[in-house]
Amino acid sequence: MANNARMYSLLGQRGTFGVKLDEVANDNDSILAITSDLTRTSGLERFFANHPDRSYNVGIAEQNSIGFAAGLADNGYVPFVTTFTNFSALRSNEFIRHYLAYMKCNVKVVGLGSGFAMELFGNTHYGVEDIGAMRSFPNIEILSPCDGLEVAKCVEYCAETKSPVYLRLSGRANNPIVNKDPDYDFKPGKGITLADGSDIVIYATGSMVANALKASKQLGERGISAGVVNMHTIKPLDADLIRKNCGAKMVVSVEEHSVIGGLGSAISEVLSSQRTHPPLLKLGVQDRYIKAGRYEYMLAQNGLDVPSIVESIAASFDKITQ
């Protein structure tokens, strides 16, 4: 893979998805793109132009798009179905359960604009419950890439694997670059330790990995050694790594998702099976809906901007070490 980290960053995760899908489709005639009236928003303009016979806009019919894709998958195709996260994971939830989880149809569902990326569209368009809605389904992998380069690796993986996948795209254009080496070791189901720390381990996913790395540096300036793990796969979760890190004084989960049902909940399930384990601080969207606003505003209001992450972790760490 060429080192296109800068280009992917400028495009954001959605744009990167479209560019990479068009690229892998050149070598795989079975790949199809399906969208619910979101061709441009999905980053699929290039794909639709280059592969018109493998491009489908089903209109605003998200549930039908899943059934349509399942039928195509049963005939040997590899359909990627795109729409906003709230529509893919919630509106189409029963169809995903039936065709992907139960029948194991080889469909790749792509959730666009996860978290607060939809900004002033408001709570009807925010995708902060999707992991919780999808995680209980058997047979579906859940990928949550941290930057554009990781999106590209996820698309390559989705094109090759024969199982259903939910690909969660977060953040906006000008995505922070986390991975600069195009040959870094990406393995679904295996978390990546990006920074070592002797006091705390921060598990972050998607858009929050970049914020976690910044928070780790600021915590270090306060004398708190905080490691960072990129949990790009929510299911299957890297339980071995979580158990390995149980010697830390505290562990933290950071996600642009509800604190109920997401990465933090998945980590707590692993920790609860251990005889002894460190306390877990779950940072994410609390159990409420608040007024809509710009992306940075929504992160700050939910304690997910870097200063808030640092203060929350420092305060909790002080309590357990006093």
Image: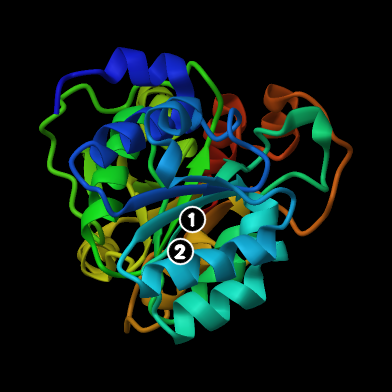
Label 2 Cα neighbours within 10 Å, binned few <14 / some 14-19 / many ≥20: some
Determine the residue located farthest toward the right in the rendered image: 291
Front position in the image: 292 or 32:
32
Front position in the image: 153 or 235:
153
**Which residue is drawn at the image coordinates 27% and 32% (left, top)?**
23
Q: Quadrant of residue 115?
A: top right
Please tell me whether residue 228 is drawn above or below residue 159 in the rendered image.
Answer: above
Please tell me whether residue 280 is drawn above or below residue 315 in the rendered image.
Answer: below
Q: Which kind of residue does numbered mark 2 sit on? A: Pro
Label 1 Cα neighbours within 10 Å, binned few <14 / some 14-19 / many ≥20: few
* Residue underneath mark 2: 279
Dot 2: element: loop
Percent coordinates x, y for residue 233 in the rendering: 34, 56
Q: Is residue 197 rendered to the left or right of residue 310?
A: left
Q: Which kind of residue does numbered mark 1 sit on? A: Ile
Q: Quadrant of residue 234?
A: bottom left
Is residue 205 visible from the viewing direction of this image? no
Q: How many marks can you see? A: 2
Query: Label for residue 320?
Result: 1
**Which residue is drawn at the image coordinates 20% and 64% (left, top)?**
244
Front position in the image: 96 or 145:
96
Q: Is residue 38 rendered to the left or right of residue 61?
A: left
Q: Are marks 1 and 2 in contact (CB under 8 Å)?
A: yes
Query: Label for residue 139?
Result: none
Q: Is residue 81 rendered to the left or right of residue 165?
A: right
Is residue 20 visible from the viewing direction of this image? yes
